[in-house]
Image (spheres, helix red, strand yellow):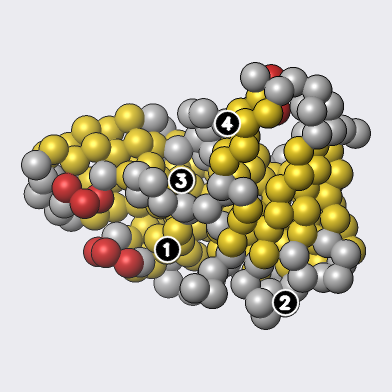
Amino acid sequence: AQSVSQHNHHVILSEAASLELGCNYSYGGTVNLFWYVQYPGQHLQLLLKYFSGDPLVKGIKGFEAEFIKSKFSFNLRKPSVQWSDTAEYFCAVNARYGNKLVFGAGTILRVKS
Amino acid sequence: DTGVSQNPRHKITKRGQNVTFRCDPISEHNRLYWYRQTLGQGPEFLTYFQNEAQLEKSRLLSDRFSAERPKGSFSTLEIQRTEQGDSAMYLCASTGDTAGETQYFGPGTRLLVL
């Protein structure tokens, strides 16, 4: 069975600090990888995704993630966070031709202005 | 707005009552998913439809839960004889023809069972 582990449940950063959120997954086959974000009071939105090709993917609002197959990891990064990045971030995986998404428990990011 | 919509957004009910939620997917999407999210956890898969066919159900979906998508458009999720443990956010998502594609989520229905 697939599983996703997010390393930190709560992260507090000051504005302009760099961000890296860890995500590791467990699955033996080919996967699609996603990061979703949920801003306060809003619904889940796609931040970025990896299906194939360049393992470094860029998403909206300056976020990027790197797929490292040997480490089963898909860490999310942003060089300089803003107060508006305060949100909950979810890593998710599905099998390449599968249907259901398996989510991590989420990381709550608070950016202090 | 052409996103996924869900109704109601909030539902408070007493234990033992039945509740029904509705999801309207993005119009051209033929795959529809239900997830449940409890506090401090990520969404957990409940069930999936391709058009009107329910193709996969999670073990989380007890016999008190039933989902339908009668004409391959909107879907309903019914919970019978609600229990306090059913309190959660119920999320709907939709996607297009290809398996593994990005799923687009609705705002969810927050259920509180008293």
Q: How many marks?
A: 4
Q: Amino acid at mark 4?
A: Thr
Please indicate, yes or no, whether residue B31 appears anywhere in the rendered image: yes
Left or right of B95 in this view: B16:
right
Give me the residue at 19% from left, 40% from top: A111
Q: Amino acid at mark 3?
A: Phe
Q: In the image, are marks 1 and 3 on the same chain? A: yes
Q: Residue B52: name its quadrant.
A: bottom right
Mark sitting on residue B97: 2
Residue B2: percent from the left, percent from the top? 54, 74
Tell me the distance, in whole angstroms, between the alpha carbons under discs 2 and 1.
20 Å
Mark 3 belongs to chain: A
Q: In the image, are marks 2 and 3 on the same chain? A: no
Q: In the image, are marks 2 and 1 on the same chain? A: no
Q: Nearer the viewer, residue A6 or B86?
A: B86
Residue A61: percent from the left, percent from the top? 27, 64
- Report crowding for label 3: few under 14, some 14 to 19, many 20 or more residues within 10 A (C-alpha): many
Left or right of B14 in this view: B55:
right
Tag 4 residue: B38
